[in-house]
Amino acid sequence: MHTNEPTPSYDKLAAHFQKISHFEHFSALGDWDQAAMMPLGGGVERGDAMAELALHIHELKTSTQVADNLALAADEALSSNQRANLREMNYQYQQATVVPGELVQAKTKMAYQCENAWREQRKNNDWQGFKPNLKAVIALAKEEAAIRAKAQNILPYDALMSKFEPGMTSAKLEQTFGALKTWLPNLIQEVQAKQVSEPKLVLKGPFDISAQQAMGKEVMALLGFDFNHGRLDISSHPFCGGVPSDVRITTRYNEADFSSAIMGIIHETGHARYEQGLPKAWKGQPAGLARSMGIHESQSLFCEMQLGANPAFLTQLQSLIKRHLNLDLSAAQLAMHYTRVSPGLIRVDADEVTYPCHILLRYEAEKAFVNGSLDVDDLPDFWSSQMQQLLGLNTDGNYKDGCMQDIHWTVGELGYFPSYTLGAMYAAQCRFAMEKVLGPIETLIAEGKLPMVFNWLQDNIWSKASLLTTDELITQATGETLNGQYLERHLRSRYLG
């Protein structure tokens, strides 16, 4: 709908949310700096400064003028996109107003304290040192969950999850993850049995880190990363941060094995391409933001798994490895290496077949934390028992490779983990939908038609930002709502032929 009627209340909201986005810009860069550049001793004061900034953003989002203008704008003659932006403004307002400012400040401060200490505690396997901080973070997360649940009339865990995955519920997830559990354990066994006679690629380092960095940047360029609006750095946990006009991605390097850093870079480049592809006409507005963490993960996993681990892409990687690392590997060797299924302790290093098991464990733990059936004291035993059950591995006494390995809980982000496996499902679904239009992805890569792949993602996912709900977005792109069968189809095809 197009109209020339004035929309004063909507216009005031748009200006107000633009102001909020400017402060969130600096908050995002503060987070990046803490993870990539800040000296360890800067943590306490940085935590105080970030808590103050978080409180200020919270006050802007919950001001009475937002409430008044939301009510008035609902009756104004808005276009469908403006109406979508108003929906997202309403959502942000509701998410912010239900939580008291003091809790926002306390959570931010505790998150910085916990994460800062965790970096050393994890290295030292110091569970006893880490435990008090984690208890404090979980207690605040539970308090937030209870407040949000009451305000929205939903389950406490759903209230936390909706921060990352609007519209997703435990009931939907139980169905989706329940179906996953029916075929995943058998698939892991089948693939391992098939691979038992395949030779393992043993990488003989050291591989110079500056050479790995140079190769990583070339791969980013191949994937269309815009270096004029982004950069690559090092952190202890790979991530993508910053803002669309200034996207910061990080990876970690291992001199003995270049393979994880390069796939980490490919993964984070997927996140970055999504951010860089968001519609500039909606920058600074809630409707111009990425749709959800599940959709965000779908873009990074599309890059990493649908593209990066594809034999045709590995053929291109092969020549880069030769040039930068002076290592002669065949594409077949690389394919075997990147499709090796081997249950391991570390989630971020897991292969794509066993990866969902790591998410199922964390999902069960988070739910149990929130509903009170699991205490932090009992987490190591719970973790070890679940690892044994899901992957046949034991983590007794090994906290750093067990329940201390992730950054998410240290910063109070409960409800985030399901987005990873939802992302893998959305990625597979997008790939098969795209192939109906463009043909096999392997052929597109081999023929140098990666831009066609990214154009499809730009048209169907990136340019839509949050103008559509998640279900609307995925239905418009693929013809149906989330369907986990596409992930099974992808994995069976790749690993069992």
Image (spheres, rainbow, N blue to C red):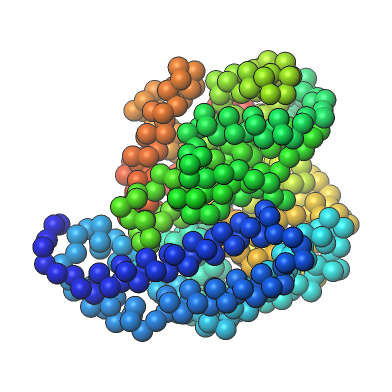
| Placement of the N terminus among the 4 image quadrants | bottom left
Pick the front one: 344 or 89: 89
Q: Residue 72, position in %: x, y? A: 23, 78
Badge count: 0
On screen, residue 279 above or below 306: below
Quadrant of the rendered image containing residue 113: bottom right
Q: Looking at this rendering, what residue extends furthest in the front direction?
A: 228
Q: Quadrant of the C terminus?
A: top right
Counting from the top left corner in percent of width and height, residue 260 is at 70, 36
Q: Nearer the viewer, residue 175 or 487?
A: 487
In the image, is 340 to the left or to the right of 434? right
Q: Is residue 17 visible?
A: yes
Is 428 left or right of 90, judged from the image as shown? Answer: right
Residue 23 shown left or right of residue 74 in the figure: right
Residue at the image position 77 percent from the left and 46 percent from the top: 345
Q: What's the residue at 56%, 53% (across, down)? A: 241
Question: Residue visible at 68% across and 46% down?
Answer: 234
Q: Residue furthest left?
A: 4
| Residue nearest the viewer, comparing 473 with 76 | 76
Residue 440 at least partly seen = no
Which residue lies at the image location 72% right of the left edge and 72% below the top edge?
44
Q: Is residue 253 above or below residue 373?
A: above
Residue 455 in the image, given as x and y percentages of width and height:
37, 34
- In the picture, measured across the screen, residue 17 lies left or right of residue 226, that is left
Give whichever of 178, 451 is nearer the camera: 451
Q: Position of residue 83 (x, y in %)?
A: 25, 63
Q: Name which quarter of the figure residue 267 lies in.
A: top right
